[in-house]
Amino acid sequence: MKKKNNTRNILLILGVVMFVVIITGMMGGLQGFSIVNKQVWQPEYLSGSCVPRADNNAELDLGKVDKSGEFFSCNTAESGKWIPVVNGVECNFKVKDEGFTFSVYECPENTLEKNIVNDCEVLRKQISTGSVESQYKIDAGNKIYINPTSFFGLGDLTLKVEYPSYGLVVRQANNFLRATTTNCLLNSLSSDIHTIDAKDMLQVIPDAPFNAVSGASLVRTTQLVSLTDVRGGETIYISRPSYYQLVKEADDGFLYVDSNNEVKDTSIECIPRTTGCSDEAKVIPLIDQSCDEFGGAITSYSPVQGDATKLCKYSCTSGTLSLTNDCIEVQANCPDNKPLWDATTGDCVSNVPKPEPVKELNVRLLIIIGAIIVILALILFKITNTKKGGKK
């Protein structure tokens, strides 16, 4: 009985081992070690800046000024508009009187009424203007203090103001402009815009543009690799044979291909997972490989060993592959309006390639296969023991 249990345990272990071997083999067949499993995007390059909006300096009526004196601020909180606190940005206050006198001061934002004389700049002393409108420009971040002199409560001062109004505008590489935001805070941008090197900057000031990217499409997974002999195994994107582009990270962790810069490296002989190319981006010789009507023939343009400047077609002659003269040149430079090179035609194209479908591992199928192996082993064991019992 003990011997029978030992035999059964051995068969179970063998079944589990075979199951693990099958899973490992199938996973190894799905992806070579050089292919990087990351979500990286072909970028659309953007630039942005803080600019005046359409309602910039639109006139607003603030009504009557308090007869005991009143502060009015040139800032975002009071105006309801985004006012950058920088030199050159001002609020224009317009005071209209009815023949009575008043004083005007420009003060720092934190000035109290009792400190006006010491902390503020006098813009106007108490004189009568004879019912006319006076204008006073106040720097952004400061405030104006208007102090009327009323006789027996008669007369009024009315106030109008032109507030600055700024927002972010984003310009695409083709000069197409996106609608402005209502402020110049970076977090007001849509979630598909990822800033570059803005670091901890929260807001943008006028005349200080920023750069950003937006994902256009996922890059081809087989071109996203880590090669030990290129940049020490750093993740790169093979743009074409002998050339690669760096994978960079935006401020929020968004990964994109730096398609503005292409680096030459002749150790990159081909694009992995294309015909005749290994996962390590090395050309696998095609000439003299066997072929016949049952398989092995190549119909597309494929790499040529020792020459990364072209792709050629192969013919099946006398049972082996032979190089033909039907070739296309690998483009050295593609124009900005057609930045991508199509390896099927040899032309530069404008459309962004779609990501290749990723093969999914059917775990349920593998479990079923493993279970069948174990069951078959047990059945075989039972049949063997039955025959032995019959002989006794």
Image (cartoon, helix red, strand yellow):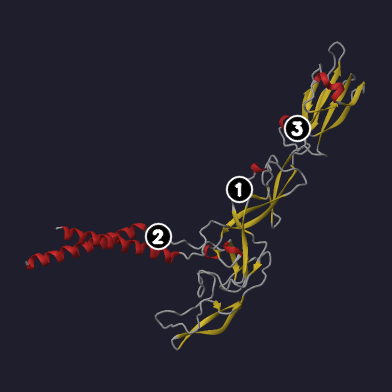
Q: Amino acid at mark 1?
A: Asp
Q: Is residue 300 above or below residue 368?
A: below
Q: In the rendered structure, are the residues bearing label 3 and label 1 in contact, judged by CB atoms less than 8 Å apart?
A: no
- Which circle, 3 or 1, is nearer the viewer? 1
The secondary element bearing badge 2 is classed as loop
Q: Quadrant of the N terminus?
A: bottom left
* Residue that protrudes farthest toward the top in the picture: 152
In the picture of the structure, the residue carrying the numbered disc 3 is 75
Q: Residue at x 53, y 69 (%)?
A: 280
Q: Residue 347's x, y, as percent?
A: 62, 72
Q: Amino acid at mark 3?
A: Asn
Work out whether residue 220 can be spotted: yes
The secondary element bearing badge 3 is classed as loop
> Is residue 171 shown left or right of residue 229?
right
**For the residue carrying disc 2, how many other residues have a C-alpha within 10 Å: few (<14), some (14-19), or many (20+)?**
few
Residue 63 bears which disc, if any? none
Q: Is residue 361 above or below residue 112?
A: below
Quadrant assignment, res 230? bottom right
Q: Nearer the viewer, residue 105 or 268?
A: 268
Disc nearer the start of the sequence (1/2): 1
The secondary element bearing badge 1 is classed as loop
Disc nearer the start of the sequence (3/2): 3
Disc nearer the start of the sequence (3/1): 3
Q: In the rendered structure, are the residues bearing label 1 and label 2 in contact, judged by CB atoms less than 8 Å apart?
A: no
Residue 252 bears which disc, if any? 1
Work out whether residue 96 can be spotted: no
In the picture of the structure, the residue carrying the numbered disc 2 is 361
* Residue that protrudes farthest toward the bottom in the picture: 318
Q: Residue 99's x, y, as percent?
A: 90, 20
Q: Residue 88's x, y, as percent?
A: 83, 39
- Which circle, 3 or 2, is nearer the viewer? 2
